[in-house]
């Protein structure tokens, strides 16, 4: 039992790590191709982002491995593979439920991470990426990574979800984490500035968070920001050459006044 559990955790760690390297690598390559020079001078920052992200992969992989083992070996979870086990409408509904719960958890823990005590000890690692790149998707302090790694694994024990829908949830989580940090907007302007863009978070919305710190805390949706008065709209992306002058991002960020981060 112990051995299979450990092997499951190791396997999931490998899957999360490879998924990160492939997804962030593809979007980083797309960025470099579309905006030559945007990543210039960011080699040290990118290496740091990758190192923190691979550490986070182990933290995300461990509970995911426990879930996989519990589902397959003990039937502990509410994950199901028979589409007829629940009404057809529950599949899209469960997708929205998972995203909403995850978004709620992320919003409030993210706001907490911007309080000075928490920021200095944890969240400054993520904001050391200035400007962030696609490699920063999982660049977290281990304690912050732990707070994010438990959400989906906890939900599968209490809220039924089809295994394919769970895959969609994880794919959306990965896509949003990468594209919100790559320094440019991949979605069409009519979506970002249209009616749907008033509800969904894309890179334009999250970019402003990395510039102003005390706003735009959400992950998928803007409603918590709107309800709590922390939505400041969409940001503007820095020119490509501005990236070359950010090698001191981590040190500068840690010296920012606490009032700017709280």
Image (cartoon, helix red, strand yellow):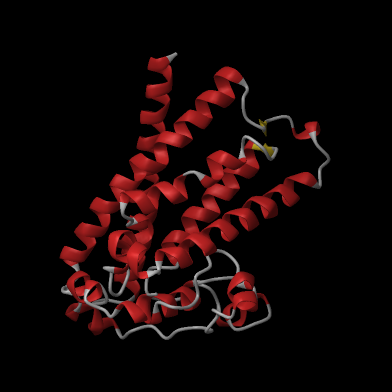
Q: Is residue 148 above or below residue 187?
A: above
* Displayed quadrant of residue 224: bottom right
Q: Which corner quadrant holds the C terminus?
A: bottom left
Tally the numbered discs. Answer: 0
Q: Residue furthest front?
A: 117
Q: Is residue 108 left or right of residue 245?
A: right
Q: Residue furthest right?
A: 87
Which residue appears at 64% of the width and 72% of the height?
223
Q: Is residue 187 above or below residue 139?
A: below
Q: Which corner quadrant holds the N terminus?
A: top left
Which residue appears at 52% of the width and 84% of the height?
232
Q: Residue furthest top?
A: 1
Which residue appears at 37% of the width and 74% of the height?
183
Q: Is residue 212 left or right of residue 109?
A: left
Percent of width and height locating residue 239: 31, 86
Q: Is residue 204 left or right of residue 190?
A: left
Which residue appears at 75% of the width and 34% of the height?
83
Percent of width and height locating residue 174: 47, 54
Q: Is residue 258 above or below residue 23?
A: below
Q: Is residue 62 visible?
A: yes
Q: Is residue 124 left or right of residue 66?
A: left
Q: Is residue 40 visible?
A: no
Percent of width and height locating residue 67: 52, 31
Comparing 8 with 231, the one in front is: 231
């Amino acid at each position: 039992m112990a051995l299979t559990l450990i092997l499951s955790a190791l396997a999931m760690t490998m899957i999360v790590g490879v998924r990160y390297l492939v997804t962030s690598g593809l979007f980083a390559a797309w960025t470099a191709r579309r905006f030559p020079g945007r990543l210039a001078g960011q080699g040290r920052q990118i290496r740091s982002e990758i190192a923190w992200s691979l550490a986070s992969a182990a933290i995300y992989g461990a509970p995911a491995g426990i879930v996989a083992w519990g589902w397959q070996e003990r039937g502990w979870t509410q994950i199901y593979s028979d589409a007829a086990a629940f009404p057809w409408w529950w599949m899209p509904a469960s997708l929205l439920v998972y995203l909403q719960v995850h978004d709620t958890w992320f919003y409030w823990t993210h706001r907490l991470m911007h309080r000075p005590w928490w920021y200095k000890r944890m969240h400054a690692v993520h904001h050391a990426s200035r400007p962030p790149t696609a490699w920063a998707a999982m660049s977290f302090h281990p304690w912050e990574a732990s707070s994010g790694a438990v959400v989906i694994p906890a939900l599968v024990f209490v809220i039924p979800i089809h295994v394919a829908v769970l895959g969609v949830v994880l794919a959306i989580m990965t896509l949003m984490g990468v594209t919100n940090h790559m320094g440019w907007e991949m979605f069409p302007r009519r979506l970002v500035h249209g009616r749907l863009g008033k509800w969904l978070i894309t890179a334009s919305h999250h970019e402003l968070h990395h510039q102003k710190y005390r706003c735009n805390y959400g992950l998928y949706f803007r409603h918590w920001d709107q309800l709590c008065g922390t939505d400041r709209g969409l940001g503007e992306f820095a020119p490509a050459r501005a990236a070359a002058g950010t090698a001191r991002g981590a040190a500068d960020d840690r010296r920012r006044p606490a009032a700017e981060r709280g």
